[in-house]
Image (cartoon, helix red, strand yellow):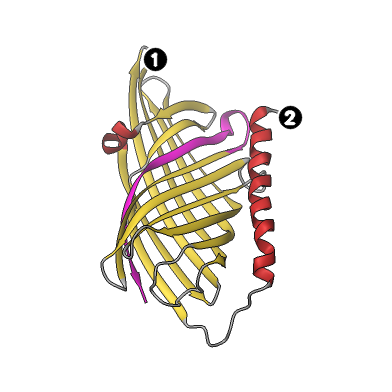
Amino acid sequence: MTGNLKTRWILCGMMLFAIGWAMPAIAQQSASDSDPWSFSIAPYLWMSGIDGDITVKGQRASMDAGFDDVWSDFEFGGNLNIEIGKGRWGAFIDPTYSEITMEETTAAGTTNTEASIRILEFGGFYRVVGPPTGMGSEPAFRMDILGGGRYWDVTGKIRNTYIGKFEQTADWLDPFIGLRILAPMTRKAAFSARGDIGGLGAGSDFTFNFAAAFGYDFTEIFSAWLGYRILSVDYEDGEGSNRIQFDTTWHGPMVGFMLRF
């Protein structure tokens, strides 16, 4: 077993252990029909860079954009998180679009590489620690168990002055499990973090997602936040001139706001 595969299974085991540790708390708590519904909508911008390799029609290209390159390589990105909850249970949906273009000139000519991802994330959560959803506005630590799926639709394009143009698309579904927390810092400011892992051969070979942010409540229904997100995926399919691979890590700052009802 390779070191990377061992690491993936260790991460999966740690996540499952954390969820198993929380199960007794779940068993002791039940939802009530009198619990109010909660609803939130959060548009945000994820200005992602990319590190890794993509293969399109058997042609491989590297894409490495650090934080300083985000503004020059980032083309477009849009995100929207919608969440609904009742008691300790809830569901969410989060569509994402991001596109990055890079250019490199070497002795082999000028190569333009473009990668775009369209993701539909969906799932549910259970609140293990903290007040039920929609209950009060007093600051309190919260921890949720997450489970769901992430549908990927990706496109890779490689154009070289000598070898020509190559374009290929792929789509797959990754299940994931994870945890998220919200920790108040003051009555209006809070720190939040979320992590999940998935894939493991069901869709991609492996994928992980981590995000952290600082938020501020301007009113009971409106807040703004600033954070950073890392989303990694290792997917491959096909052989020879029909081979496509996305072994990439998307990363960058996020900024957005949230409305709660």
Does the stretch in magenta take in 255?
Answer: yes
- The picture quadrant where one finds residue 9 is top right
| Crowd around label 2: few <14 · some 14–19 · many ≥20 (10 Å) | few
- State the count of labels: 2
The residue range painted magenta reads: 235-261
Task: Assess whether residue 81 is covered by the magenta stretch.
Answer: no
Crowding at mark 1 (Cα within 10 Å: few <14, some 14-19, many 20+): few
Q: Position of residue 224 (x, y in %)?
A: 29, 60
Residue at the spot 63% in from the left edge and 42% down from the top edge: 11
Name the residue at 54% across, 62% down: 144
Q: State the residue position of label 2.
A: 1
Q: Position of residue 41 (x, y in %)?
A: 37, 68
Foreground pick, 44 / 114? 44
Q: Is residue 78 above or below residue 134?
A: above
Res. 47 mark? none
Q: Main secondary structure of the magenta part?
A: strand
Q: Residue at x 49, y 66 (%)?
A: 92
Residue beneath label 1, please?
108
Q: Is residue 6 left or right of residue 207?
A: right
Q: Residue furthest top?
A: 107
Residue 232 shown left or right of residue 212 in the figure: right
Name, please, the residue furthest toward the front.
Answer: 186
Kind of element beneath mark 2? loop
Q: Please, what is the three-letter code of the amino acid marked with disc 1? A: Ala
Q: Provide residue 95's location: percent of width, then percent of height.
A: 44, 58
